[in-house]
Image: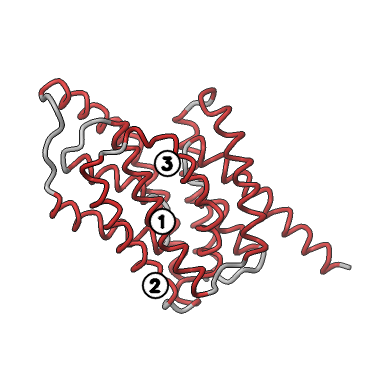
């Protein structure tokens, strides 16, 4: 009976964590800081937990892409998708060939890295907006972007997204801005394109290898979607700075827990 109650509580924790992750992703991002540890908490092995979490949260990225499709830079679409495919598949393959124990030791570092990236995204996002406004005032039309250089700058980020992913979208925006993309809505749209394509390729790799725990994945997917719908409704009423701080603190605390657990 005790084992049955424990299983039920773990299942309820997965539901709650998935819904919270959906709300966080809709409002500010960083939902993986909650949903990924929840996958581990219900007894899924580390690599399978990462793969299952990627699949569960991907539909939210797809709906975002449908909303932002009019802002996509057509001249960069093939390059970004191609780089995302190569990087996402490579990252996923490396993940699948990583030993479970090795990945378990990497988890706190990956979570901490993601949290710190997310933490600096606020001031850097403001810099990106200011830069976009300044460039728009100085130039007419869209500047040419060095696509060869952009490929080599984006590839390691897409690799990281295929391997783990937290904070990867922000890095894509930063690289695109440094290469001359000026408008904020285009940066956001191309970020979603790259993240969506990288994760989709990783998902196919995970499915073919049989590393998805489908019953937990489907539950998480449904409730993350419900949380995303709720979060989208209330996102404009919440203070963005507070939300960002909550996400960063959550990521750091969870990373600290995994560091502690390893000692």
Residue 27, image x, y percentages: 51, 35
Q: Estimate how packed mark 3 is, as few (under 14), some (14 to 19) or many (20 or more) residues with alpha carbons within 10 Å.
A: many
Q: Nearer the viewer, mark 3 or mark 1?
A: 3
Alpha carbon separation for disc pair 3 and 1? 17 Å
Residue position for label 2: 93
Who comes first in sequence, dot 2 or dot 1? 2
Image point 45% across, 57% down: which residue? 111
Q: Which mark is residue 58?
A: none
Image point 70% across, 54% down: which residue? 13
Asked if the residue at tag 2 contacts the one at tag 3, i.e. Cβ–Cβ closer than 8 Å, the answer is no
Q: Which mark is residue 65?
A: 3
Taking 74 as reference, is 87 above or below it?
A: below
Q: Nearer the viewer, mark 2 or mark 1?
A: 2
> Which structural element holds mark 3?
helix
The residue sitting at the right extreme is 1
Q: Estimate how packed mark 2 is, as few (under 14), some (14 to 19) or many (20 or more) residues with alpha carbons within 10 Å.
A: some
């Amino acid at each position: 009976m005790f084992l049955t109650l424990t299983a039920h509580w773990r299942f309820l924790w997965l539901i709650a964590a998935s819904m919270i992750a959906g709300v966080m992703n809709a409002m500010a991002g960083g939902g993986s800081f909650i949903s990924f540890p929840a996958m581990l908490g219900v007894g899924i092995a580390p690599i399978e937990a990462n793969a299952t979490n990627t699949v569960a949260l991907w539909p939210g990225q797809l709906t975002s892409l449908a909303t932002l499709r009019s802002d996509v830079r057509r001249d960069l679409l093939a390059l970004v998708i191609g780089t995302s495919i190569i990087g996402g598949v490579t990252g996923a393959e490396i993940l699948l060939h990583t030993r479970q124990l090795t990945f378990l030791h990497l988890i706190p570092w990956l979570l901490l890295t993601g949290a710190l990236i997310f933490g600096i995204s606020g001031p850097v996002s403001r810099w990106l907006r200011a830069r976009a406004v300044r460039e728009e005032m100085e130039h007419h039309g869209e500047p040419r972007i060095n696509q060869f250089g952009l490929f080599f700058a984006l590839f390691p980020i897409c690799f990281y997204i295929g391997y783990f992913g937290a904070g990867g979208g922000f890095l894509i925006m930063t690289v695109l801005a440094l290469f001359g993309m000026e408008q904020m809505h285009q940066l956001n749209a191309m970020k979603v394109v790259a993240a969506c394509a990288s994760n989709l390729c990783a998902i196919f790799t995970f499915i073919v290898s049989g590393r998805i725990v489908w019953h937990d994945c489907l539950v998480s997917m449904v409730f993350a979607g419900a949380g995303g719908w709720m979060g989208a409704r209330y996102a404009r009423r919440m203070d963005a700075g507070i939300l960002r701080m909550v996400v960063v603190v959550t990521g750091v605390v969870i990373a600290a827990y995994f560091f502690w657990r390893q000692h």
